[in-house]
Image: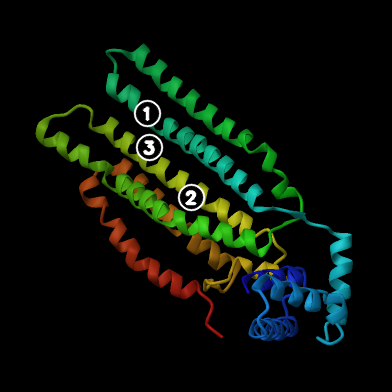
Amino acid sequence: METIKNYLEAMFAGMPNTAEVRKAKAELLQMMEDKFNELIAEGKPENTAVGTVISEFGNLDELAEDLNLTKEVEETRTRESETPRRNITIDDATAFFANRGKKATFLALGVMFCIISIACPILFGEKLENISAAMMFTCIAIGVGCIIYSSFVDAEWKFLNKELCRIDMATANFIKERRRSFESTRALCVTIGVILCVVCWVPNIVETYIGLNVAPALMFLLVGIGVFLIIYSSKIYSGFEKLLKLNDINTISGSYYEQNISPVRYKSKIAQTIVEIYWPVITCIYLIISFLTFNWGLTWIIWPIAGVLHRAVVINCRADEE
């Protein structure tokens, strides 16, 4: 039966995502299920029943008039012939994710090296000024090199930004399963990353009591590791979103991204942007104020305040349910 559903999805993939088309699709699925169950009741093998159903109902051109979709079918055929889309298969998606992991690693490493480079002059100070400067610029060079390399490592996938592409239902389900499997890893990376950025001031407090001279350097190291985890997990996760959003949103296949989830709708594009950049902006504000005042024991209060305000921001930016 799953084969029949997947076949039906492929039939309607390029059709416009309208109420009439969705209704016709549901009606056709019901007819196909009834025929399949009828054949099974007659003692037909499952494979034979599936083949019979597909051969009987598998031509949308012939069924268009009965389903009142003649106009939609003709428009779909014309659109697909004039603007063909490149198919992304499960094998393509697997290769893309492997490449995405490599890109995410080098990008995150690049940013981390640039951040921790500041720790070199702090650690060695004026006593080894030349060595500390050399180490700092070496870290920066490595970081910039990693960032530049990350921009080239996915060159073979640049076509996703330039060409019209599409995925079928099977590929969409595969991507969603990979995304679900990565959810726990992403949550762990982001949580640890944020915690490291928040508690990076702890070495400064410890230094006050035991006289450590490496506290500022440890602070930048903690921030660097935290930022690495956040960037790495975010870059990987954005890869899932990228592939799931390839299909034309005006077609049935465009709904693959939103199936089984309840997307949040915002009042405007500006409202959506405000919500998306809220936590990055709060992080920047926290670090700027903390570095300017060096009052790390007090600036942490920014986070609980931001948490309370975040709910209010989301409520005011979210569109009312219809």
Residue receiving disc 3 = 224
Residue placed at 59% from the left, 47% from the top? Answer: 94
* Position of 267 relative to 126 (above/below): below
Identity, as a three-letter code, of the amino acid under mark 3: Gly
Viewed as shown, does residue 158 lie left or right of 142? Answer: right
Picture quadrant of residue 60: bottom right
| Mark 3 neighbour density, 10 Å: few (under 14) some (14–19) many (20 or more) | many
Q: Position of residue 100 (x, y in %)?
A: 56, 43
Viewed as shown, does residue 75 lie left or right of 158? Answer: right
Residue placed at 89% from the left, 74% from the top? Answer: 74
Residue receiving disc 2 = 234
Residue receiving disc 1 = 118
Identity, as a three-letter code, of the amino acid under mark 1: Ile
Identity, as a three-letter code, of the amino acid under mark 2: Ser
Distance of mark 3 from mark 2, alpha carbons?
15 Å
Picture quadrant of residue 67: bottom right
Q: Position of residue 200 (x, y in %)?
A: 28, 42
* Frontmost residue, 183 versus 170: 170
Distance of mark 1 from mark 2, alpha carbons?
24 Å
Picture quadrant of residue 308: bottom left
* Position of 97 relative to 310 (above/below): above
Query: Given this view, does label 3 or label 2 mark the residue nearer the observer?
Result: 2
